[in-house]
Structures are given as structure tokens and as C-alpha cells.
Image (spheres, rainbow, N blue to C red):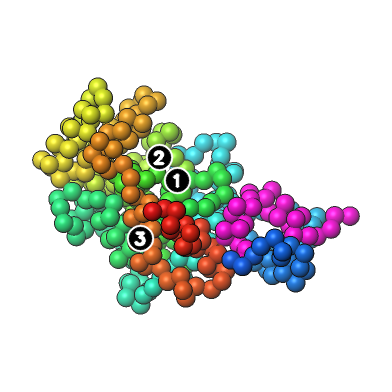
């Protein structure tokens, strides 16, 4: 007969899609170390944490014969998803929803945020409302405006795999945007954030019914919901849906043309370069696009900016121990901050 131990419990959790790295970041307390493994009283505490995280009974968690599983989200709208990953995305979606709930519970000043955050239905209308020091709209302008509206933009550092590119959802009554992939180019991330904002503006998501985009560039999704979100992002970043056509034989040509268009029109140069990459069919497009934005000194800094906004708006000191564990999956640990600098 199988004994119920910490090892068998974590093995069952791993089979459910939550490996040890995620367990240590999101569920175990920050004081946990190897000396705790033989303490039955501490095992009881971990059982409670896992039952709460999975939304399952303690009896089921304590039964070594019982199969653990991530809750399903049958109403989730999965976009740009490879068929092989469709069933395997459940753990990442559930983890993201739990982390988002911890963020919402620990907003620094929720009383000053409107109880029903909203966005203009048209991306161009939102672009015109965003306060910014220049004609073009940057990731800092977009993400900062979303946080001020009470819509958290949450970059996730630790997630089960396979992961996703972005999620737009409603958590604890509040719209949220979650970013799973760790792109660091501000222009590239700005498009993903604006795209997810488009889903929120169009009311594509609802409680327990998030919109999940697994990939941005590798999978074509020409459905109306995705075309509308792409158009919204283009309106925000470029000012209209007609993306200026830039072409070049190398990354230097792309950088030069995009920079010139930005000076003339106020359309973000990085947004145009990555739009060029999305349009093209060559396998090296995103590598060339990254080289082009690097030539413009815009190839890094997105993760640091998103972390700074998270730190500005989320109160880690007031979080419960279980919420602090979930928030470690964003940027809640000092050692993670140092590593990101």
C-alpha cells in the first residue's frame, strides 16, 4: 500500500502539471528547507496549501491513491494554440488565475481605483487618452495607463509548462492582463499588452472565461476575435490600422525606415518592425526584427519596466503568507530583483 509522504504528494502534484520549481515558488512557505521533509505537522500545512490552490478536498489531497488535477476552465477561449498543447495548458492557466487573484487582493490603494475599470472600445480613442511625453506610444505609457485604470499587467516569472503568450481575464471582479513568455523587447511586449487590452475592451473575457493566446507569431488565427484585438493594438501603437509598409534587405534598412516613419507619423518604430515580422513568412523574421530594434537601442528593458510597475502598485508587505508565495511567481523576491538588474 502506498504511503502518504511529502515525496508521494509532490510526485502526484508533478503529474498534475505542477513541478517542483513551481511548488517551491508558488506554494511552499519561504522558510521551507530540506529539514522540513520529515515533520508530519509541516506536511499537514502543505496539504492545506495544496488543497486550497487546487480547490480540492483535504481528503483527496491526503489520499495517495487519488489523482490530483488542475481545475479546468471550460469557458476559456484558447487562441493561437497548437492542438498538442490544448489539454496541457490547464496548469498554466490555473496558476495564472491564482497569481492574478493574489495581485488584485494586494493592490496598494484599491480605494482610489474605480470599482469597474474599463477601456475605450476603440484603440485609437484609448491612444488619444494616454498621457505621454512624445507623439509615439510606448510600453511604459500603455502599461502605466492600464495600472492607473485598475487593470494590472502581470509579468509571470514562474509558470507550469507549456505556458502561454498572454491572457486577458476577469479576476475578483477586475480585468487583468497576464504575460507568460519572457520577451524583453518593449515594442514586442507593447503589442501583446495592447492585444490583450483589446480583448478586455471588447468584453471577450468573463469570470472563469479568460482569453488565452498561446503564441503571437507562430500560429495564424484569422478569427474575428483575434483580428479585432490585433486591430485594437495597431490603433494604439501606430494610430491607425494601415501599418506603414517597411521593407529592407537587412536589419539596418528596417531600423532606418521604421525610425523615419516614427519621426513623421508618431507610430512606434518597434511596433512597425515587429508588424513587418508578423507579416512575413521567412523563418528568420523575428531574429531580423530583434536585430533591427537592437540597432535602435530598443531591444531590452520590458521586463524591468513591468517589474517596476508591479512594485509600485502591489503591496507585498501586507500580503498573507500564501499570497506572498503566489506573488513570488511574479517579481516578489529580492534575489529575483537583483538578478533582473
Q: Position of residue 106 (x, y in %)?
A: 45, 71
Q: Residue 334 or 72: which is nearer the viewer? A: 334
The residue to which callout 1 is attached is 181
The Cα–Cα distance between marks 1 and 3, rounded to whole angstroms, is 18 Å
Q: Residues within 10 Å of mark 2 (few under 14, many from 20)?
A: some
The answer to whether the residue labelled 2 contacts the one labelled 1, judged by CB atoms less than 8 Å apart, is yes
Residue 183 in which image quadrant:
top left
Residue ID at (80%, 60%): 4
Q: Residues within 10 Å of mark 3 (few under 14, many from 20)?
A: few
Determine whether the residue tagged by mark 3 lies in a helix, strand or loop. Answer: helix
Residue ID at (57%, 69%): 322
Q: Residue 204 or 260: which is nearer the viewer? A: 260
Q: Position of residue 229 (x, y in %)?
A: 33, 46
Q: Earlier in the sequence, mark 2 or mark 3?
A: 2
Q: Earlier in the sequence, mark 1 or mark 3?
A: 1
Residue farthest to the top, as pictured: 249
The residue to which callout 3 is attached is 308
Q: Position of residue 114 (x, y in %)?
A: 32, 72
Determine whether the residue tagged by mark 2 lies in a helix, strand or loop. Answer: loop
The residue to which callout 2 is attached is 216
Residue farthest to the bottom, as pictured: 111
Is any part of residue 169 visible from this angle?
Answer: no
Is 108 situated left or right of 82 in this image? Answer: left
The Cα–Cα distance between marks 2 and 1, rounded to whole angstroms, is 10 Å
Is any part of residue 138 visible from this angle?
Answer: yes
Please count the marks in the image: 3
Range of residues picked out in magenta: 1-29
Q: Residues within 10 Å of mark 1 (few under 14, many from 20)?
A: some
Magenta stretch encompasses residue 162: no
Q: Position of residue 161 (x, y in %)?
A: 56, 45
Residue farthest to the right, as pictured: 1
Amino acid at each position: 500500500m502506498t504511503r502518504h509522504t511529502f515525496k508521494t504528494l509532490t510526485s502526484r502534484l508533478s503529474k498534475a502539471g505542477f513541478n517542483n520549481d513551481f511548488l517551491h515558488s508558488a506554494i511552499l512557505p519561504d522558510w521551507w528547507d530540506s529539514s522540513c521533509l520529515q515533520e508530519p505537522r509541516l506536511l499537514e500545512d502543505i496539504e492545506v496549501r495544496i488543497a486550497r490552490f487546487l480547490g480540492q478536498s483535504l481528503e483527496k489531497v491526503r489520499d495517495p491513491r487519488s489523482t490530483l488535477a488542475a481545475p479546468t476552465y471550460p469557458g476559456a477561449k484558447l487562441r493561437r494554440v497548437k492542438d498538442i498543447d490544448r489539454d496541457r495548458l490547464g496548469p498554466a492557466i490555473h496558476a495564472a488565475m491564482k497569481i492574478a487573484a493574489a495581485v488584485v487582493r494586494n493592490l496598494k490603494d484599491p480605494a482610489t481605483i474605480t470599482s469597474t475599470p474599463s477601456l475605450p472600445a476603440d484603440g485609437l480613442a484609448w491612444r488619444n487618452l494616454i498621457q505621454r511625453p512624445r507623439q509615439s506610444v510606448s510600453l511604459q505609457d500603455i502599461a502605466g495607463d492600464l495600472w492607473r485604470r485598475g487593470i494590472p499587467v502581470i509579468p509571470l516569472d514562474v509558470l507550469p509548462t507549456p505556458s502561454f503568450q498572454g491572457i486577458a481575464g476577469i479576476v475578483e471582479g477586475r480585468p487583468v492582463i497576464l504575460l507568460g513568455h519572457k520577451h524583453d523587447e518593449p515594442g514586442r511586449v507593447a503589442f501583446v499588452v495592447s492585444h490583450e487590452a483589446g480583448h478586455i475592451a471588447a468584453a471577450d473575457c468573463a469570470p472563469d472565461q479568460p482569453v488565452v493566446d498561446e503564441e503571437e507569431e507562430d500560429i495564424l488565427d484569422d478569427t474575428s476575435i483575434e483580428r479585432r484585438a490585433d486591430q485594437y493594438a495597431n490603433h494604439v501603437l501606430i494610430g491607425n490600422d494601415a501599418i506603414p509598409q517597411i521593407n529592407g534587405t537587412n536589419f539596418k534598412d528596417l531600423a532606418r525606415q521604421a525610425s523615419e516613419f516614427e519621426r513623421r507619423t508618431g507610430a512606434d518604430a518597434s511596433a512597425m518592425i515587429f508588424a513587418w515580422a508578423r507579416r512575413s513568412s521567412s523563418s528568420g523574421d523575428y531574429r531580423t526584427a530583434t536585430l533591427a530594434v537592437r540597432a535602435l537601442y530598443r531591444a531590452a528593458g520590458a521586463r524591468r519596466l513591468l517589474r517596476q510597475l508591479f512594485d509600485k502598485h502591489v503591496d507585498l508587505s501586507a500580503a498573507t503568507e500564501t499570497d506572498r508565495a503566489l506573488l513570488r511567481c511574479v517579481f516578489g523576491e529580492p534575489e529575483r530583483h537583483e538578478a533582473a538588474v
